[in-house]
């Protein structure tokens, strides 16, 4: 009899000890976001922006909102990051470290579709919420992962607005050429673009890829020139976008419109190419000037959270200690923080399963725009804008409700641009 | 139409190939004299690219005039790295020099990132173009090609007409024999390493004249790989072989694209790389010492 009491006592004590050490039941004194950031290597530029965006929104949550409201208690948000050097192997090992050693509550994906996809199985293995802010490929969400949630829009939607805009502006335009990086992200973008182009009645007269890290596009562009397209959609990431535009100018390849993904919308693009970038367009998830506000959210019946656009810009500058305007990499990463905070508050917990469920039910608006996901975690609420370089300035030309200026079409020829002609709407 | 494209691409390939060749000569020179494989090669190309960028954007100095500046910077870096690290490792296992040159590359990349940031930059030197009918050639590319050929010729004359060049050749042939004959082998090592780095940094300027965008602290990676392939193709220890290898590589890379583009359901760019490496393999099977290197 005494022996059975002893066994019961041990069982009860063990159960108590276990319950105390299990985070789900422990009183949280902080919520930790872990991030294998891209601070060096290929994606260092985008990675720095993402870091600034996350820090800015973490600061806003702590200083303005007073922390994350978990069942009536305000808990501070903490951000831990390590440099993944834009390498897949570092991403996977850093996620392991963040989950097992740092005991984070949520992992933010690094950047790019390839790196995001490489880290997803690790987060999945640990049942850890994985916030994707820079991996646009739809393929990531076709793998059956349960803990990944996207804030950046899906790749297949990137050029839909561009095609709609050209169809409306120039009904006679017929021939489209697609030339893009052989990467997961660019393939998905062009898969969506090709399907939408065909739906709108365009002829795809050229469709070719080029490898990652390409240093010379001359052979591909010579072949593209021979197909005489009315307009060109292309690109992949920043460096090849610059190369694409520059070598089109070198080879005197002129088209009515040129839209390049992930490159043309960034200030450094125009700084590097100057007049050659006049009239070049690019789709963007967010641009400084797109004013989503609390009033706008109210109008469309969505909950509002986060700083205003100008507040975000100030917080971003403070976070990086630099006088730079954030680009969409920063905005989408910041918006992912807000989504997590809102979901954790709705769940009243940091338990990944509960937060994931809350994210599934979540619909809101922030400075980044609307946010909503489907069952797979794919972003379906956010809409993109098209930006064009006109007289050295970025003008939002599509959709009409977000326009800050009209489209300059056709784009001036490279010979005219060399003589000083700028892109201006007629 | 296809023939025009092929000829156009071959012309572009030849111009680019001359720059590839120039880009590889420094690598081959260092290996030929010191038997050191410079794994950080691409970072020195990046230094040249930034030299060109900042002289043009900051001071308005055209890239042609940036060539002597880059050469001086390269020579200085070469002597610094030689006397601070390489000299101590000449008799160490090969892994030590591999790690040392790798570390040099990382150091330069991170200094560049810290100083200039990680943005991809570029410059726009507005010069005219020549229309050749089959293709259009901006004069910047032509200047880069002619600059590469001129530097290769000067290097040839240096090796064959000067005492320092003869000393270098003697060390390549037999360093012990050269020492016995009174050649300052340590001095030759230092000069060769510095000259190799100087040529590599200079090639960075020429490269930006061909492609004046994408200038970034980490831009050297793809060029390091190409330089190794070209160096092996031309004969790893032969700077002239490297130049010739560069021309062959440029022609293969650009020319084969047009041919593969005629095949249905293939991505020509992917096959272009495959083809370049296949030709490399075949050449090595026939001439294991490379195209221009004797046994």
Image: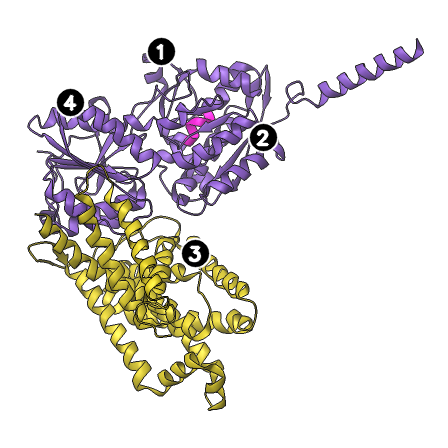
Q: Specify whether disc 4 shares its chain with disc 3.
A: no
Magenta stretch bounds = A333-338
Q: Is mark 3 on a helix, strand or loop?
A: helix
In this rendering, position of residue A261 left or right of residue A118: left
Write the residue at 9% across / 54% down: B134
The numbered mark, 1 or 4, whose residue comes first in the sequence reads: 4
Q: In this view, does A126 lie above or below B39?
A: above
Q: Main secondary structure of the magenta part?
A: helix
Q: Is residue A396 above or below residue B170?
A: above
Q: Mark 3 lies on which chain?
A: B
Q: What element carries label 1?
A: loop
Q: Mark 4 lies on which chain?
A: A
Where is mark 1, residue-wise? A301
Q: Specify whether disc 1 shares its chain with disc 4.
A: yes
In the orientation shown, which residue stands out farthest toward the top?
A1
Colour seen for chain B: yellow
In what quadrant of the picture does the C terminus of chain A appear? top left
Where is mark 3, residue-wise? B109
Asked whether B267 or A337 is in front, the reply is B267
Where is mark 4, residue-wise? A200
Residue A218 at x, y = what percent? 20, 50
In this rendering, position of residue B253 left or right of residue B92: left
Q: Is residue B75 above or below residue B13?
A: below
Q: How far apart are marks 1 and 4 (CA)?
A: 32 Å
Q: How crowded is mark 1: few (under 14 residues within 10 Å), some or many (20 or more)?
A: few
Q: How crowded is mark 4: few (under 14 residues within 10 Å), some or many (20 or more)?
A: few
């Amino acid at each position: 009899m005494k022996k059975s009491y002893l066994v019961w006592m041990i069982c009860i004590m063990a159960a108590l000890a276990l319950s105390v050490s299990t985070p789900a039941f422990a009183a949280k004194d902080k919520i930790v976001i872990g991030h294998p950031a891209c601070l060096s290597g290929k994606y260092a530029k985008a990675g720095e922006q993402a870091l600034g965006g996350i820090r800015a929104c973490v600061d806003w949550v702590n200083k303005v909102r007073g922390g994350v409201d978990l069942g009536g208690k305000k808990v501070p948000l903490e951000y831990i990051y390590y440099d993944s050097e834009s390498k897949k192997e570092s991403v996977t090992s850093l996620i392991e470290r963040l989950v097992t050693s740092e005991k984070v509550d949520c992992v933010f994906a690094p950047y790019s579709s390839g790196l995001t996809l490489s880290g997803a199985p690790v987060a999945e293995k640990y049942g850890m919420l994985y916030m994707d802010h820079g991996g646009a490929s739809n393929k990531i969400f076709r793998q059956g992962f349960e803990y990944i949630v996207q804030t950046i829009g899906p790749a297949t939607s990137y050029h839909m607005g561009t095609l709609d805009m050209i169809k409306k502006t120039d009904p006679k335009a017929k021939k489209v050429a697609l030339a893009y990086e052989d990467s997961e992200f660019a393939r998905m973008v062009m898969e969506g673009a090709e399907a939408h182009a065909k739906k709108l009645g365009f002829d795809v007269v050229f469709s070719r890829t080029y490898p990652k890290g390409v240093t010379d596009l001359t052979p591909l562009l010579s072949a593209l020139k021979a197909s005489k397209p009315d307009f060109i959609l292309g690109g992949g990431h920043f460096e090849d976008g610059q190369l694409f535009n520059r070598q089109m100018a070198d080879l005197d390849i002129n088209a009515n419109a040129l839209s390049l993904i992930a490159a043309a919308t960034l200030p450094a693009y125009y700084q590097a190419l100057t007049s050659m970038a006049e009239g070049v367009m690019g789709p963007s998830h967010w641009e400084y000037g797109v004013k989503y506000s609390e009033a706008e959210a109210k109008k469309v019946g969505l909950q509002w959270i986060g700083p205003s656009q100008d507040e975000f810009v100030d917080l971003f500058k403070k976070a990086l200690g630099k006088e730079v305007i954030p680009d969409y990499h920063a905005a989408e990463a910041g918006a992912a923080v807000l989504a997590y905070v809102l979901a954790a508050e709705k769940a009243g917990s940091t338990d990944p399963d509960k937060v994931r469920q809350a994210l599934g039910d979540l619909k809101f608006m922030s400075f980044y725009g609307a946010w909503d996901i489907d069952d797979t975690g794919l972003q379906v609420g956010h809409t993109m804008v098209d930006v064009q370089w006109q007289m050295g300035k970025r003008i939002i030309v599509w959709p009409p409700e977000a326009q800050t200026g009209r489209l300059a079409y056709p784009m001036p020829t490279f010979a005219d641009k060399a003589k000083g002609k700028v892109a201006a709407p007629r | 139409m296809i023939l025009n494209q092929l000829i156009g691409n071959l012309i572009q390939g030849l111009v680019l190939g001359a720059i590839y060749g120039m880009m590889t000569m420094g690598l081959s020179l260092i290996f030929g004299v010191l038997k050191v494989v410079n794994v950080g090669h691409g970072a020195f190309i990046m230094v040249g690219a930034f030299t060109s960028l900042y002289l043009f954007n900051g001071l308005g100095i055209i890239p042609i005039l940036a060539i002597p500046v880059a050469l001086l910077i390269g020579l200085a870096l070469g002597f610094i790295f030689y006397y601070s690290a390489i000299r101590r490792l000449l008799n160490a296992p090969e892994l030590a020099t591999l790690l040392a040159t790798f570390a040099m590359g990382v150091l330069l990349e991170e200094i560049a990132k810290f100083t200039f940031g990680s943005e991809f930059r570029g410059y726009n030197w507005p010069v005219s173009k020549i229309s050749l009918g089959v293709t259009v050639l901006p004069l910047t590319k032509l200047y880069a090609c002619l600059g590469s050929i001129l530097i290769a010729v000067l290097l040839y004359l240096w090796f064959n007409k000067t005492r320092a060049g003869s000393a270098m050749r003697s060390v390549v042939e037999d360093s012990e024999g050269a020492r016995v004959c009174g050649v300052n082998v340590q001095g030759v090592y230092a000069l060769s390493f510095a000259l190799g780095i100087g040529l590599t940094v200079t090639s960075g300027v020429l490269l930006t004249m061909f492609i004046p965008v994408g200038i970034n602290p980490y831009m050297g990676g793809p060029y390091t790989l190409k330089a190794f392939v070209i160096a092996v193709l031309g004969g790893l220890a032969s700077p002239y072989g490297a130049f010739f290898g560069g021309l062959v590589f440029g022609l293969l890379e650009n020319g084969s694209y047009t041919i593969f583009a005629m095949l249905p359901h293939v991505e020509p760019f992917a096959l272009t790389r495959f083809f370049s490496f296949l030709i490399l393999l075949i050449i090595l099977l026939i001439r294991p010492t490379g195209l221009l290197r004797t046994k």
